[in-house]
Image: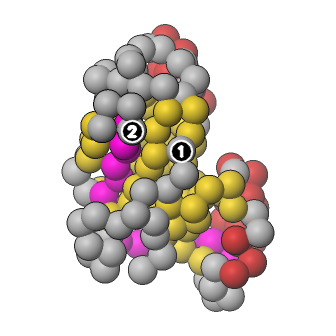
Amino acid sequence: MSACDAVAKTDAGALHFLVTPLVSVPTGVAPWREKSINDTGNGILLRSDAALDGLKTGTLRIYPADYGFGMFDSASDTVLKWRPVVGVARFSTTAASAVSTFNVQFRTARSGNDPDWGGSFTRQAGTCYWVNAIISH
């Protein structure tokens, strides 16, 4: 987390994400909806403290399959999609200097290629966005 923050501060023109894909066990996602800061089309975004607590208590685990991460800039109608990965990953783009707001998306084998986008976030230059998402199947 701190490495992503450090890179973002020195490269403020780029947009940086540190993604922690999660799955809820064994109770499902209902208890997590109360802690959600934003819903993506097929996921629930959590604050870092809630995600870390869930990992520590075993009520959350790292999503075990590959996923694709994407970002949408509605002002320029631009979509950026990164190659699918497994586990925690860092994504960045230097093609983001004009981005003022953005939405994120997760794609899985079950969700298809174009699930709904989540709500928008306001960009703050020099920030690494920690995206902690419970990914729904």
Query: Could you tell me which residue is drawn at 46 percent across and 65 percent down?
Result: 41
CA–CA distance between discs 1 and 2?
9 Å
Out of 79 and 134, give the one closest to the viewer.
Answer: 79
Please tell me the numbered disc located at residue 74: 2
Is the residue 14 above or below the residue 54 in the image? Answer: above
Out of 72 and 2, give the one closest to the viewer.
Answer: 72
Circles 1, 2 touching at the beta carbon (< 8 Å): yes
Q: Answer with the quarter of the image where residue 114 lies.
A: bottom left
Q: How many marks?
A: 2
Q: Is residue 61 visible?
A: yes
Extreme residue in the bottom direction: 26
Instruction: Report the residue marked by disc 1.
Output: 120
Query: Could you tell me which residue is drawn at 75 percent across and 52 percent down?
Result: 49
Q: Amino acid at mark 1?
A: Ser
- Count residues near mark 1 (Cα–Cα under 10 Å), then give few for <14, some for 14-19, many for 20+: some
Which portion, as a residue range, is magenta? 58-73
Looking at the image, residue 15 sits to the left or right of residue 113; the answer is: right
Main SS of residues in magenta = strand
Q: Magenta span has 59?
A: yes
